[in-house]
Structures are given as C-alpha cells and as structure tokens.
C-alpha cells in the first residue's frame, strides 16, 4: 500500500519506518519539500521511502496517517488538500496537547469534540480512524516490547476504514483481540482525554514504556 505519513517528529519517523519495514511504500510529508528530518529519514529508510510536502505525500498515497500535533493537525491536513484526502482512510494518531500555559499541558479540544472529529468534519470525504494515540511511539510499532496482553483502542465512522487501520496495526504486531473497537468517531474524545492520565502514569512509572490492559470478567 502507498502510505503518506504526515509529520516528521518522532512519531512520524517511528510509524513511517515500521511501515517501510512491513513492505509498504511510504512518503513522509511536512510543511516544506526540503524538510531535513524527512530527507534524512527517507535517505536512511531505502528505496520504498520518500518525502515531500503534505500535499505531495497525500496526493500520491492510498492511505494517510496523521502524525502532526493535535493543535496543528487541521492546518496540516488543509495543506495536504481536501482533494488529496477524499475517499482515503486517514488514521489519526495525534493528541490535542497545548503547552502554551506550561506543564502539565491542557487539551486544546475536549468534552464535546476531538481532533479526530474536527478532521472528519473539515474533510467529510476522508474516512478518519482514531488509533495509536494512547501509547508511546515505540509501543505503537512494537507492542511486544511489553510483556503480556495490553489494549489498544480504535474508533471511526467507516467500518471498512477501521478494517484497513486494523490491518496496519496487525502488521505492527498488535493481536486483533487486543485492539478494542470503541465504535464511532465520538469515542476519540475519551481516547484523547485519557492523555492527562497517561501523563500522570508516565510520571509515576518514571517512563513511557507502559500501556494499560482492559480486563473483563469471563462469560
Ligand atoms: N510522542 C509519542 O510517542 C506520542 C504518542 C502518542 C501520540 N502522539 C501524538 O503524535 C503527534 C506527533 O507527535 P511528534 O512528537 O512526533 O511530533 P510533533 O512535534 O507534535 O509534530 C510534528 C509535525 O507537526 C508539523 N507542524 C508543526 N507546526 C505546524 C503548523 N503550524 N502547521 C502544520 N503542521 C505543523 C511539523 O511540520 P514540519 O515537518 O514541517 O516541521 C511536523 O511534521 C502529536 O499529536 C502527539 O501528541 C505522540
């Protein structure tokens, strides 16, 4: 599959690298065609890797992964262009963290909407799926680095789009039974509002190498 990874930060690089490693062709997108991090990543990642502007990457791709900051995701996708997103699965990994008031960050959107819903509303022809935002990027692409079973969430309005996203997750090593479908895209509110708790867990545990597991009674 031809996949655009929008974002040149550690998440974009981790996701893009893992996708190339699973045999996908990947173009990393950024605000400028000459982004140094994207160029360095593409040079290192081999012949299936490339880079360009958000619009270059999205226009070329069959599927798009948004790995930009939650507060700038709308701007990044506008730069990618509605016509380049129409009909495509857009996997949104972002979190709406606003550090402008210091630490801990506050959420730039919450309660009545989410970044994922904002993207879906702005680009109604895109098929937005929210997933992976509740774990650190190393765990995103290598869940087996944690022992035992642990849970990842997914939500979205389009069942086929969710199935496509689940396929990518399986490629990263997520067992299907540990990927919990929370329903339509309004579930992204809770997935994003979990991040303040995630940040406290990181502080309490002294690092980001953890996840939560949803445990149910049998029967
Ligand atoms: N760190 C983790 O492990 C982790 C885990 C779960 C979720 N997340 C979420 O994943 C996302 C990516 O995190 P990150 O730390 O890798 O990267 P980041 O620093 O949050 O975002 C980097 C990307 O945002 C773009 N950007 C910045 N300002 C912009 C603007 N005004 N308009 C359009 N695009 C803009 C940058 O474009 P240029 O390339 O042009 O500079 C860059 O590609 C975030 O939403 C984060 O909350 C992170």
Image (tube, rainbow, N blue to C red):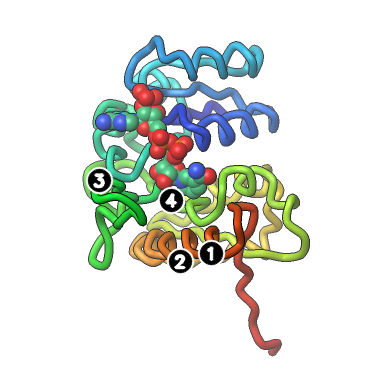
- Residue placed at 50% from the left, 13% from the top? 39
Left or right, 156 with reference to 16: left
Left or right, 164 with reference to 173: left
Mark nearest the camera among 2 and 3 is: 3
* Cα–Cα span, label 2 and label 3: 19 Å
| Nearer to the camera, 198 or 128 | 198
Q: Is residue 91 visible?
A: no
| Secondary structure of residue under mark 2 | helix
Using the image, tell me which numbered label, if any, was put on residue 129: 4
Q: Which numbered disc flags the more N-terminal residue, 2 or 3?
A: 3
Crowdedness near tag 2: few (<14), some (14–19) or many (≥20) residues, C-alpha within 10 Å:
few
Q: Which residue is mark 2?
A: 197
- Residue placed at 36% from the left, 56% from the top? 104
Q: Which residue is mark 3?
A: 100
Q: Which residue is mark 1?
A: 201
| Secondary structure of residue under mark 1 | helix
Q: Which numbered disc flags the more N-terminal residue, 2 or 4?
A: 4
Q: Is disc 2 in contact with disc 1, using a CB cutoff of under 8 Å?
A: yes
* Cα–Cα span, label 4 and label 1: 25 Å
Q: Quadrant of the N terminus?
A: top right
- Residue placed at 44% from the left, 53% from the top? 130
| Secondary structure of residue under mark 4 | strand
| Secondary structure of residue under mark 3 | loop
Ligand 1 appears in which quadrant?
top left
Q: Which numbered disc flags the more N-terminal residue, 1 or 3?
A: 3
Residue 116, image x, y percentages: 34, 51
């Amino acid at each position: 599959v031809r996949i655009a990874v929008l974002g040149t930060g550690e998440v974009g690089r981790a996701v893009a690298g893992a996708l190339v490693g699973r045999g996908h062709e990947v173009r990393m997108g950024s605000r400028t065609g000459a982004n140094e991090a994207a160029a360095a990543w593409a040079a290192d990642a081999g012949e299936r890797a490339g880079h360009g502007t958000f619009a270059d990457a999205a226009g070329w791709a069959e599927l798009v992964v948004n790995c930009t900051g939650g507060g700038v995701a709308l701007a990044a996708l506008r730069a990618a262009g509605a016509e380049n997103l129409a009909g495509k699965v857009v996997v949104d990994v972002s979190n709406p963290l606003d550090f402008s008031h210091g630490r801990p960050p506050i959420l730039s959107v919450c309660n009545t909407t989410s970044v994922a819903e904002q993207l879906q509303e702005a680009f109604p022809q895109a098929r937005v799926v929210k997933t992976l935002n509740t774990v650190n990027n190393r765990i995103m692409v290598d869940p087996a680095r944690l022992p035992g079973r642990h849970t990842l969430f997914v939500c979205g309005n389009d069942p086929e789009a969710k199935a496509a996203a689940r396929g990518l997750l399986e490629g990263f090593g997520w067992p299907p039974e540990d990927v919990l479908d929370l329903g339509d895209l309004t579930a992204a509110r809770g997935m994003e509002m979990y991040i303040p708790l995630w940040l406290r867990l990181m502080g309490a545990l002294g690092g980001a190498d953890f996840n939560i597991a949803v445990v149910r009674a049998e029967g």
